[in-house]
Amino acid sequence: MYQIGKIIGQRVALGALTLWIVSIVIFAGVQFLPGDIATEILGRSATPEAVAAIRKSLGLDVPAHIRYFQWLGSILQGNFGTALANGRDIAELIRPRFINTLLLALSAAVISVPLALLGGIVAALYRNTIVDRSINIVTLASISFPEFFVGYVLILFLSVQAGILPSMSDVDSSTALVDRLIAMALPSLTLAVVVLAHMMRMTRTSIINVLGNQYIETARLKGLPERRVLVGHALPNALAPIANVIVMNLAYLITGVVVVEVVFVYPGLGQLIVDSVQKRDIPVVQACSLIFAATYVVLNLIADILSIVTNPRLLHPK
Amino acid sequence: MSERGKMSTEQCAGIATAGELLTIENLRIEAPASNSVRGGVPSILVDDVSLSVRRGRVMGLIGESGAGKSTIGLASMGYGRGGIKITGGSVVVNGRDIRKLSKAGLRKLRGKEICYVAQSAAAAFNPAKRLMDQVVEAALMHGVSSRADAEARAVILFKKLGLPDPEKIGRRFPHQVSGGQLQRVMTAMALCSEPDLIVFDEPTTALDVTTQIDVLAAIRDAMRETSVAAIYITHDLAVVAQVADEIMVLRGGKMVEQGTTRQIIHHPRQDYTKALVAVHDIQHPEKPAAASPILAIDRLTAGYGNGTIKVLEDVALVLEKAHTLAIVGESGSGKSTLARVITGLLPPMSGSLKFDGKALPARLAERSKNELRQLQMIYQMADVAMNPRQTVATIIGRPIEFYFGIKGDERDRRVAKLLDQIELGKEFANRYPSELSGGQKQRICIARALAAKPRIIICDEVTSALDPLVSNGILKLLLQLQKEEEIAYLFITHDLATVSSIADSVVVMHRGRVVRSGAKSQVLNPPFDPYTELLLSSVPQLNEGWLDGAIASRRMQPAGN
């Protein structure tokens, strides 16, 4: 157990280090965005004096490295600052939208993860048959289409022609849960289709890789049916790579929703970041980017820890 | 027979008619064309083999790798690895022809009527599941007994097989028990569903000799007590002589000879069987000691992790010019670590290393090209020691270019000469490693070492992965080359038979220390220290009563089981 604690401790430290480096990259990257908020606010009529005055009032005249440490310091205290465009508290601005994004990701995951596992196992069970090939073709096709295309196709069929589901996902904090779920249905489905293929193919590949091991032959020579060989003997040993790819896709569900949120006009973090980039609202862009990065790092950390604790050699030392 | 109360009428009918459990007639097994090395033509793995096993009897299958032993063993369960198929003959188990059984019918047979014990228990157990779950799985699956009964039976079997802590060992995971213990658990797993026949596929080959003897005795006793019939597959005639009632000798998928154990080992009829029986026929007279050491090691201590783990302690040895020094010990005794220290891969913590009278730098990076050239190495696994994408000429030519700067025609001439020396011939120059047999691969590795014109070659278990007759050829070649080129060998092995056929002096290692050393005649003859005696008495001998005698006369318990 001590060993596991140590390994997990190392991973957490490594995650924190990654996040710190990411914060530098984000800050530096945003500095290179063309134009700035002052010219954006003042428009074409900006005089140099007026621009300088606004920059000063916003604190943009201070050297970048000092601003970086000020920014980092206040974030560590939970203070993301205020949005330049409308002076609102950024934490307040982000919270409901982040929850919306998480909800969307969650519902997409609830649809796609069980489906991916099931499909992967079925494909592995009937490998190299018509069943496997069909699953393969369908998933490959779905991974090849861009998200917005999948989104519009779903809108066309389920919303415009069949009229079952709404094409706009306009929700707010007062929307009831059922309505919210109905509103989220199409974007969740779109996201699910996009991430499904990767997870399913990885599940199939991981299981088939494990099938080459000798203990699988042992299981077959015990007279176990192929189904039990796969689920009882191969799957437990394939869990680490599968968990990894699932968590990677969950991270994508949260950070990669920008296009889907825009297509369905869903008020999540993705839309906020697109709006803020247009308005040159640097503190908001930085905060959103950092949240995305943190999500990615934390989820990868979870994947790492999962693969550590599913390893019997580490879990049950000699 | 009272133990097997649950036999179906079908099975009973089988007994009534023949009394034979397994009857194989004119068996022919082929690999599909796509799997064949030659491409296009299906290769025949087993051809026209017939055998029968009666209840409670043990049939030994013996032969080199590629003889078709495992293929026949698995065929009795209707199982073929990698798409290989039974294409002729019949396999009748308990009165039913398995070639006529459906997939579901075969599954009912496997794990219930016939069980399988694999060579490497470490690979054959699922690393993610507890031992007990795996041991009782087949019995539960086939409805032989309830979980509680199956577990109770497993504990009894664990006891019978001499496993420590039989009540609790089932709760462990495979990596938590040793190799010898795992092999016993595997035997318990096979016995747990009370089968009629067990196929043992080289169950002790991967174990140390001192562990092998205990596992072998445990397997034999368990077979006798449960009166289960068995097919016992091995390449070691001395091992099979201890357990089998009858022996079949196979070669290249065909039967060479079949008879009772006594007849095969005492009165073999075929030349091939005679060669197998007389395999250790190399007479190597010990060279007289000359006080001209090429390598001298003194008070050497080495290990890993900044001195926390010591693998070698206070090791001293002397290798004379053009002599062979055998280093003997079980796995974990530090033999290979010693080779790593001598080659400079692992700098020692303390002690001295002298080559031809001069101190040898401890680190690889500090050694000159000439020092590197004079110390070459040959490995156990010849196929992983060669780049599969390089031809034989490139592999052997590399040290010639690297150490002597010789290129072009002169290099090719030297390669051809080396290929002649290792008895292969220059037509091998353009082949790739995958086109060679195991013995030929090891010969190429020898040629590569030889190409550097070394003074010492470290041979790390070079014959362990080879069949007896092939390894015999390699040993003869090494002795021949020693005579021609005056090379000294540091010969690392766990096989004492090999030691007596090649060594001039011997060092016995145990847990990182030298427990005995000296001239071969002195080390291999009494009076013995307890460990050397244990090692020597554990080497299987080709007579039927050896196992009982060896177990009875032991003074020291082996560590590894």
Image (cartoon, rainbow, N blue to C red):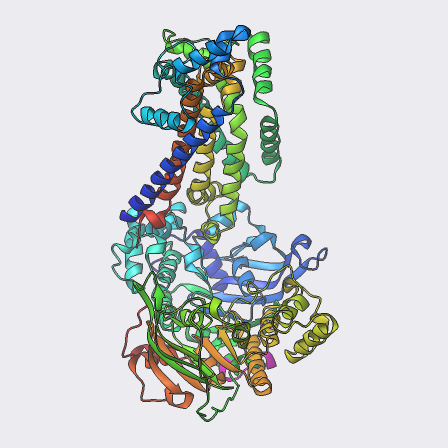
Left/right placement of residue B86 relative to residue B494 reads right
The C terminus of chain B: image quadrant? bottom left
Residue B466, above or below A153: below
Q: Is residue A169 visible?
A: no
User: For residue A23: magenta?
Assistant: no
The number of discs equals: 0
The N terminus of chain B: image quadrant? bottom left
Seen from the viewer's position, the closer of residues B521 and B124 is: B521
Q: Is residue B342 visible?
A: yes
- The single residue placed furthest to the front in the displayed view is A49
- State the image coordinates of residue A238 (x, y, percent, origin top left): 45, 42
Give the residues in magenta: B265-272
Image point 27% across, 79% down: which residue?
B555
Seen from the viewer's position, the closer of residues B312 and B204 is: B312
- State the image coordinates of residue B541 (x, y, percent, origin top left): 43, 80
Left/right placement of residue A48 relative to residue A87 reads right
Image point 61% across, 67% down: which residue?
B253
Seen from the viewer's position, the closer of residues A235 and A221 is: A235
User: For residue B270: magenta?
Assistant: yes
- State the image coordinates of residue A203 (x, y, percent, origin top left): 50, 37
Residue A49, above or below B166: above
Seen from the viewer's position, the closer of residues A224 and B525 is: B525
- State the image coordinates of residue A257 (x, y, percent, origin top left): 49, 21
Image point 50% across, 80% down: which residue?
B489
